[in-house]
Amino acid sequence: MRLTGKVFIFGNNIDTDVIIPGRYLVTSEAEELARYCFEDIRPGFGRRAGVKGSIILAGENFGSGSSREHAPLAIKGAGIKCVLAKSFSRIFLRNAINIGLPIAEVSQIDGFSEGDEITVDFTKGAVRNNRTKEIFKITSLPEFIQKIMKSGGWLNYINNFILRGAR
Amino acid sequence: MKKEMTITEKILARKLGREVEPGEFLLLEVDVGLGNDITAPLAIKEFQKYGGRKVFNPDKIVLVLDHFTPNKDIKSAQQSKLVRCFAQEQGIKKFFDEGRGGIEHVLLPEEGLIKPGDLVVGADSHTCTYGALGALAVGVGSTDLAGVFLCGQVWLRVPETIKIELVGNLREYVSGKDIVLKILSIIGVDGANYKVLEFGGDGVKKISMDSRFTISNMAVEAGAKTGVFPVDDKTVEYCQERGIRPVEIIADPAPNYAKEIKLNLDDLDLQVAYPYLPSKGKDIQEAAKEKIEIDQVVIGSCTNGRMEDLRMAASILKGGRVYRKTRCIIIPGSQQVYYQALKEGLIEIFVKSDCVIAPPTCGPCLGGHMGVVAEGEKVVATTNRNFVGRMGHPRSEIYLASPAVAAASALKGYICGPQSI
Ligand code: SF4
């Protein structure tokens, strides 16, 4: 799988309250949540043109804090193609896998500037900065996780592999 | 030779009937699947979208309305209604509506719904609270809960364990909150990412159940999968009071820990975590010097909304008045806690000292309602997160502390410990 898009760069410890503030959790509609994505650190981000089709690049511990799946949903709903970070918080990683939002850990984020166009190649385990032509490593996901991702998320996996024939 | 196991490995081995290795992926039957008024609606929607008609096992599902209840607006009322109807149509008996429940992580242990050795998955990050009972309790997302609705199972990666060895005795006023804030300031907000914090050592024996819940509750603030305590006399007593005959799960003497950290409780002072991370803890001595003026104090939440917490707060507030420029909100964690506090005369103390008593709800903890703060306001809260915008305006500030520090600060109007009263 290959994805290309412009990058938005975020720092370390971007928590789920920042990704989607608690006060907007009165809905679970991805499109509506997307409007307030990153509202408290980048007001208006979720309503901006150019977010759709982009890629997020962040530092350590992306998605820390609450288990709200509304966080990866808001990101997915905003049309963001994938999230690369130096590391992810556990529940965010889990939720992203479960809802089928592509994510990967990247070796470093210093070689990128906001707005650079990048290409993420999940099969090759690499990300290319198309401006500087530099290539960086991304870690590949364990086989089990890949199987969930390939099924299109956890519930598809359940239907395909656990409940098959049971219903 | 038999493998020496951590508490987590023992729980998993017990379930599977074989040994497990960190890093292994498992499909497991859950004992309890939990959802609330924020996370359950999404799970219900997904469950239905993927063809679910009847939930796999209604008796293993617990649903609690606690985040925006009593509902703050039409949208949150719709969410609650959705969960309420689902519980009814699916025959889920462990459904807790307002007036009959409280904050999920105070409520479930109190109701005897969690047993040592259980695998609990909750669509709420503070599900780790139940680790205090020697359960493997893991916060997950809504899709995971939908998965439990569909097939009763969850996927898990066997985590590595960090051992926290507690030794010595707690000083006066020092409690579980100070222990966990201190640990967070040592290991950081991602210091235990993907791992389990396991508590052990002689010091554990002296830590009350309520304080253990507080400690396990904030394990997730270090990124941990959960925070687990061994089952000892205190756990057994707690379980027996609720009609549970517990299995005694303790770690083997020398399992393979990823890391071991020792904390001497004799040296531990009251802690205050500065904005905007729970790991930014300072000793109260230092914090008090800064005389940070406080607009609001919140005593409650799934971290510190239990009897020990309210008793501590009341003992400090008794006979005093909240400083005239400060507001103080007290939130009993559950209906039971509320009633007990009432019987013990604590509510009277709070009212007389000018506190607001909120119904058992998450309320201001996540900036939902009942105590949302304005720009520039400073708060001392006994909650678990002080992220940007957590309690309201992005330019407000939250200082996390124990009920002792919160109550003392409410009286003085600035951050201080009970020694200053
Ligand atoms: S009290 Fe706060 S941390 Fe606990 S469940 Fe409610 S919102 Fe979450």
Image (tube, coloured by chain):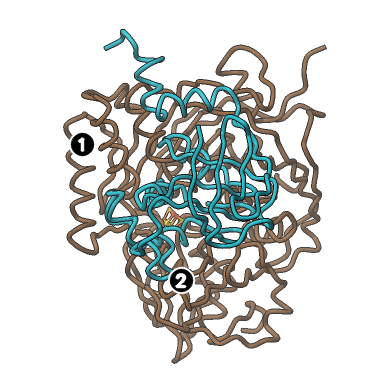
Residue B104: where, in percent of width, then height? 39, 47
Residue B176, by quadrant, is bottom right
**N-term mark: 2 or 1:** 1
Q: How many marks?
A: 2
Q: Is residue A161 above or below residue B130?
A: above
The residue located at (35%, 71%) in the rendering is B357
Residue A13, by quadrant, is bottom right
- Compared across the picture, whether B97 is left or right of B384 comes to left
Residue B246, by quadrant, is top right
Camera-side residue of B260 and A91: A91
Residue B242: where, in percent of width, then height? 44, 36
Q: Is residue B349 at least partly visible in the picture?
A: no
Q: Which quadrant, please, contains the C terminus of chain B? A: bottom right
Numbered tag placed on residue B46 in the rendering: none
Label 1: few (<14), some (14–19) or many (≥20) C-alpha neighbours in 10 Å: some
- Compared across the picture, whether B170 is left or right of A1 comes to right
Shade representing chain A: cyan
Look at label 2 and name its amino acid: Val
Q: Which quadrant, please, contains the N terminus of chain B? A: top right
| Chain coloured brown here | B
Q: Is residue B27 above or below residue B337?
A: above
Is the residue marked 2 within 8 Å of ligand 1, measured from its CB? Answer: no
Chain on which label 1 sits: B
Q: Residue furthest bottom?
A: B324
Give SS at disc 1.
helix
Q: Is residue B312 at least partly visible in the picture?
A: yes
Look at label 1 and name its amino acid: Phe
Question: Dot 1 corresponds to which residue?
Answer: B86
Chain on which label 2 sits: B
Numbered tag placed on residue B298 in the rendering: 2
- Compared across the picture, whether B381 is left or right of B38 comes to right
